[in-house]
Amino acid sequence: MSRPSLLSNLANACEQRAQDGLLRRLRTVSASDGIYLVSDGKRLRNFASNDYLGLARHPQLLEALIKAAKQWGVGATAAHQLGGHRDEHAALESELAAWTGRERALLFSTGYMANLGIMQTLLHPRAVCVQDKLNHVCLIDGARLSGARLKRYVHADVESARRQLLSEPEAAALLASDGVFSMDGDIAPLRALADLCTEQQATLMIDDAHGLGVLGDNGEGSVAAAGLDAQDVPLLMATLGKALGVAGAFVAGPADLIEGLRQFARTQIYTTAMPPALAAASRIALRLARDEHWRREKLLRLIAFFRHGASQHGIVLANSPTPIQPVLIGASDSAMTVSSRLEAAGFFVPAIRPPTVPENSARLRVTLSAEHEESDLAELLAALVAAGVGSR
C-alpha cells in the first residue's frame, strides 16, 4: 500500500484555496514613511496599519531602541529564566502592571504565544472554556490545545454565553473574549460578561490587543473604559505591537496568577526573551500612550468624521466606535476588485476574506491612525465611491 503524502495534501489544499479565489498573497513593503508605504514600486496611503496612535516611528522610541541596543545588544540571547531577563524587561513589567491597575505583569514574545501559554497553564481536560465566536484565532487555538472542552457563544450575546456555562455546571470555567474585535471593531459587552462570570463563578479573561492605548481615560484599554477593575477582570492580556507601535505582549493580573504563569507557561519559559531594546522602546511608548491624550482625542474626531462621511456616501460600515472601520462588501471577489481599484488610486486597503471572516462577509478593514488627517479620510471616501462602493 502507498502512504498518503503530507506535502501533496498541503499542495492540494493551496490549489483548492486558489481555485476558490481565497489564496493569500504576500506583499513586501520596501519603504514606509508616516501614513505612506511603498510596495511594488507604488507609493500608497496606508489604511491597514494597527499603529493607531502613530507611535511606531516616534523619535523618542527610536532613540530609546538605539540606546538600549548599544547597551544590551540586539537580542536577549536566552530565555527569561536563563539570563535573558534584563533590567528593561523588569521595569516594563512593573510599568505595565501599574498602568493597567494590576498587581503584576508578565512579558511574552507575541500575543499568540501569550494566549497559548495562558490556556495551557490554566485549563485542563476537565475544565470548560467559553468563548465568543468572533474571538481571535489564538484564543480558540489555545483552548483546543489545552484539551479543555471549548464552547462558543453567539457574538456579543451574554445570554448565549450563560447557556454555555450552565451546560457545564460542575466544571471549572474560563470565559474568554476579545475586548475589541479585530475584524469588526466593536467592543465586547464587558460589564455584562463580568457580572455573568461573578454569577457563574467563572474566571474572566479579556484579550485587549486592540483596546490598549486607544480606550480608557489614560489608554488603559477597554476594560478600564467599561469601568471595570482587576477584581472584575482578573486576567488581562494585551499586545505591544498595535497602539504602542512596538512588538511583544503581556499578561497582567494577581500576583498568584503571574507567578503561576512564570512557573508553568511553556510558551514563556521555553523561548528567548524579547530583545531588551524593544522593552526599552515599549516603556517610552507606554508613557506617550498614557500621557499624550491628544492622540486618542484626535482618533475620536477621525472616527466620527469617517463614519459621518461614509453615511453621506451610502457606504455601509460595521457598527464600530474604534479605529477599526470595516467597509462591508460581502462577496470575496467584489472585495478584491474594490481593493485593487483603491490601490490604483493610491490607497492600501487590503480585502479581508474567509476564512478570516465568515462566508459572505468579506470587507475592507480600514484602520485609522492619529497620523491621518481628515483630508486623507475624505479622499479615501471619494476613492471608495469611485471604486463602486456606496452611491455617487
Image (spheres, rainbow, N blue to C red):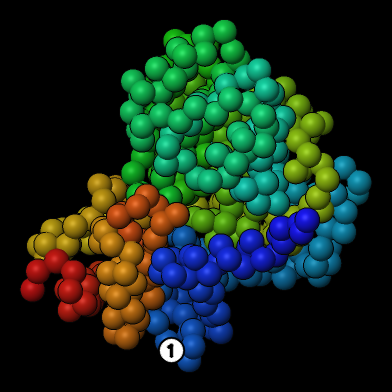
Q: Quadrant of residue 250?
A: top right
Answer above or below: position of 23 versus 163.
Answer: below
Position of residue 174 relative to residue 224, above or below, is above
Determine if residue 69 is in view. Answer: yes
- Near-viewer residue (363 or 377): 363
Number of on-image labels: 1
Viewer-side residue, 355 vs 263: 355
Query: Camera-side residue: 119 or 78?
Result: 119
Amino acid at the residue labelled 1 = Lys
Q: Quadrant of the C terminus?
A: bottom left
Residue at 66% across, 40% down: 116
Residue at 63%, 26% in the rendered image: 148
Residue 283's x, y, as percent?
A: 64, 53
| Residue at screen point 21% across, 77% down | 387
* Residue 326 drawn at (x, y percent): 31, 57
Along the horizontal axis of the image, is 269 left or right of 20? right
- Left or right of 60? Residue 210 is left
Visible residue check, residue 367: no
Q: Which residue is mark 1?
A: 42
Instruction: Provide residue 302's location: percent of width, then percent of height.
Output: 28, 60
Question: Label 1: few (<14), some or many (≥20) within 10 Å?
Answer: some
Point out the residue furthest to the front here.
1
- The N terminus lies in quadrant: bottom right
220 with respect to 331 (left or right): right
Location of residue 107 (image quadrant): top right
